[in-house]
Structures are given as C-alpha cells and as structure tokens.
Image (cartoon, grey):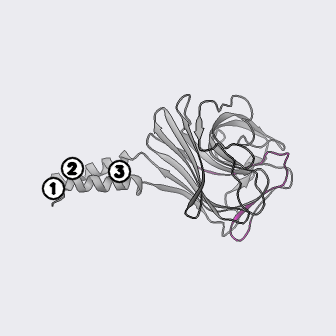
Amino acid sequence: MKISVLTALLAASALAATSSQATVVFTDTFESGTGDWYRAWSGGSTSLTTDNDRLSFTFADTGAQEVIGRSFDSQTIPVGGSLTVTFDFRQTSSTGIFRVGFYDLSEGAFDAGGWAQTSTGSYAGYTTFIRDNGSNIARRENGNFNTTVSQAYPTVGTNQGSGGTVSDITDSGGGTNFSFANDTDYQFSFTIDRVSATQIDTRLLVMEGATERYNVVGSQTSGTLHTDFNTVVLRTSSGTALYDNIQLTYIPEPSTALLGGIGMLCLLRRRR
C-alpha cells in the first residue's frame, strides 16, 4: 500500500511536534561546582555546595525561610506549550517538606547573591510541594516580596507580602503524606502545561527507578493565568538534599511542527 506524501509529512510532523521542537534551556551536572544556583537567604549557616558532583543543600535554620534557585532566559508558554524541569534527588537526612516551582520575578535574573540582598519586587508562578507530615498540594502564588535576612523570597510558607492567592487552583493526587527514604535515588519532573487560553495544568511526578512513588496534579481554570517564567526554585525544610542532572526543557505549541510539515508539502507540490 502506498503512503501519500501528505500522509507521511503529517505523521512526521505529529512526531516532531512532541519531540524535535523541545528546547533544552539549561542542563546542570555540577561537575565544576554549584554553577548558577544560589540560595535566597543571607543569614544563618545554610550551605550550598557540591558533594560528589551533586548540588548539596543543607537547611540548617528551621526558623528561617530558605530556598535555592536558578534564573534563566524568560520563557512564555503559548497555548499547547509546556515547561518542564527534571532532576535526580537524594536526601541524606530528612527533608520534611520538599517544594519545586516556576516563577516570574519582576526584578528579572539574579546573580548568585541577588536573592540574599534586601530588595523589593513581585512574583508570580506555580509550585507543588510534598510533605511527610500532611497532605500535599499544587499551588498558584503571586504577590509582593521584600527579601531581608529573615525572609527570603516567596516560595516558602504561605504567600509572602500582599496580594497572594492560591484559591483558583485545584489539586489531586496529594491527599496523603509521603516520606522519602534516606540515601535513595529518586527522579523528579515538574511540568506546567498551558492547556488552553483559560487553563494551566501542573504535575509533579516522583519516580524511583521504574516505579511511580508519588504525583501531585494541579489545574487552574479561573483567574489570571501565569504564563511567563524566568526562575526555577527548589526547597527543603530540613536536613540535607542532593540534586543532580537538573534540566529545563521548553516545548512550544504542537502546531508549530505541523505547520512546518504543511509548508514542506506546498514546496514539494510546486516543484512537481
């Protein structure tokens, strides 16, 4: 049976839409230090170092609000597009609450010490956290923030500053707590999907090898969507966590590759 040029191109375009159009924004393997990662707190004894080519974050001050992050070139998610961060995770001592999120910081990119300085701005984005002593949840967050030596960046605790909201995102898959085992490797992926002009979905998936250990799914279908992001953040509430092979991937709307395939078809027909 013959396969027409149109059929072949459409099939190839459909495959390309989900694979070849993906753009790797950054990849960090920590073979040469902590790279562009930094911690958002200037006080206490919290450390951010490397341990056997892994990023090591020790939360040492339980009364403080601490988070680590990395800035990247701002990405706007169109309808049908997504933004995903994947990484390997291992705890050497209990982390209590683990959080990961994407944010748009009004002050733009920060250097390694930027978050540790007193500054005022705004934040908007999505986060998900897993707790070992309570239900887990996906959240939408936005508001004003003022980083000081005792309050650093908004992705910890409740919404910092004024104007924060979490009321217009629903979540599932987070009804029970989950405890990570010490000295065990887990694989994480956190994705933001812009399903439509009025819907954003989020998903945090935790794997241990080929076994799914946990997932937290969120969906926003009302209120103002957040679609621009320039910072990824990670946080643990205690203990020491190790991160490796952190990769951020951006996928534009699937129709991009399909339109490219149709364009190729037009060129082929003109030549014939």
Q: Which residue is mark 2?
A: 266
Can you identify the residue that label 1 sits on? 271
| Stretch of the chain drawn in magenta | 50-73
User: Where the C terminus falls, by quadrant?
Assistant: bottom left
Element class at badge 3: helix
Looking at the rendered image, the disc whose residue lies closer to the viewer, 1 or 3, is 3
- Quarter residue 220 falls in: top right
Which label sits on residue 257?
3
What residue type is disc 2 on?
Answer: Cys
Q: Position of residue 181 (x, y in %)?
A: 71, 61
Which residue appears at 77% of the width and 43% of the height?
A: 152
Question: Who comes first in sequence, dot 1 or dot 3?
Answer: 3
Q: Amino acid at mark 3?
A: Ala
Position above or below: 113 against 125: below
Mark 2 Cα shell of 10 Å, populated few (<14), some (14-19), many (≥20): few
Which SS class for mark 2?
A: helix
* Residue type beneath disc 1: Arg
Image quadrant occupied by the N terminus: bottom left
- Looking at this view, is 142 or 2 the one in front? 2
Real-space CA distance between mark 1 and mark 2, rounded to the nearest whole angstrom? 9 Å
Q: Earlier in the sequence, mark 2 or mark 3?
A: 3
